[in-house]
């Protein structure tokens, strides 16, 4: 319970990057003892969602531009492999799951619900990625996604505040294109679009971390 609650709070943006997490306060808020909270924080630290420093304790992880480049480089290597295997094995029900996630993402974007949009975005991609049926590969891919989620929440929130949903609509359009190509049975074309989509995501994070956005 502690792990799920803390992870959700970070993904929702309730605990933005750089926020200190006091174990005793978190335990009191969750109605738990400190021990499960401490274990949950250790797990989140191993996933890259929080960081730990002696004398300071745990904080929600902050990213630097060079760290983002590293994350996306590893994502490129691992996800390209997973997508290549998965795209060739995609079933009608997987296409349907991607379509349902895209519909949910559209609705969440229209409603300004950042948490739901992030969840639907992830569901869209993992409806494909899960078909690679390689749990070890998926484990590392999920960890890379987890490391970026706090910053993805911040990006959605800033977009909502500015009222500019142009990029959010572009992402929806890219997802629609990916889905259409996969439904047509052209995995090679889909892989090219997915690679370009990932490159766009990297650019999004660099914009988020640039001084003018801070």
Image: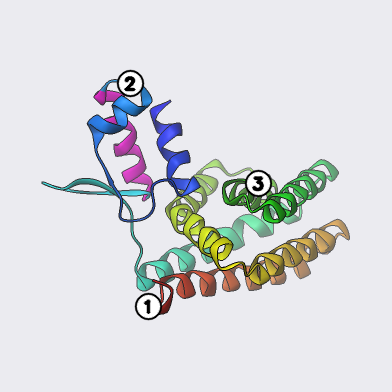
Q: Pinpoint residue 181: horizontal percent, then vertical percent.
A: 83, 64
Secondary-structure class at tag 3: helix
Q: Which residue is mark 3?
A: 123
In the shown orientation, is residue 180 left or right of residue 64? Answer: right
Q: Quadrant of the C terminus?
A: bottom left
- Which stretch did the figure color magenta? 34-48
Identify the residue at image location x=39%, y=53%. Answer: 16
Q: Which residue is mark 1?
A: 211
Task: Tell which circle, 3 or 2, labels the residue nearer the N-terminal end.
Answer: 2
In the shown orientation, is residue 75 left or right of residue 117? Answer: left
The foreground one among 161 and 57 is 161
Secondary-structure class at tag 2: loop
Identify the residue at image location x=30%, y=25%. Answer: 28
Task: Tell which circle, 1 or 2, labels the residue nearer the N-terminal end.
Answer: 2
Q: Pinpoint residue 86: horizontal percent, then vertical percent.
A: 70, 52
Magenta span main SS: helix
Q: Which residue is mark 2?
A: 32
């Amino acid at each position: 319970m502690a792990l799920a609650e803390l992870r959700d709070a970070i993904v929702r943006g309730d605990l933005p990057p750089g926020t200190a997490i006091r174990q005793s306060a978190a335990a009191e808020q969750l109605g738990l003892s400190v021990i499960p909270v401490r274990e949950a924080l250790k797990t989140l630290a191993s996933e890259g969602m929080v960081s730990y420093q002696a004398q300071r304790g745990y904080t929600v992880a902050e990213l630097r531009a060079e760290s983002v480049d590293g994350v996306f480089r590893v994502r490129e290597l691992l996800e390209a492999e997973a997508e290549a295997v998965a795209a060739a094995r995609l079933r009608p029900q997987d296409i349907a799951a991607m379509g349902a996630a895209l519909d949910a993402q559209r609705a969440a974007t229209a409603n300004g619900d950042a948490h739901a949009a992030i969840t639907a975005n992830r569901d869209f991609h993992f409806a494909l990625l899960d078909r690679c049926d390689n749990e070890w590969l998926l484990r590392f891919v999920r960890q890379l996604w987890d490391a970026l989620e706090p910053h993805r929440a911040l990006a959605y929130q800033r977009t909502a505040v500015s009222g500019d949903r142009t990029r959010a609509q572009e992402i929806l359009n890219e997802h629609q294109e990916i889905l259409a190509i996969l439904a047509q049975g052209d995995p090679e074309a889909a892989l090219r679009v997915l690679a370009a989509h990932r490159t766009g995501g990297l650019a999004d994070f660099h914009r988020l971390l640039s001084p003018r956005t801070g």
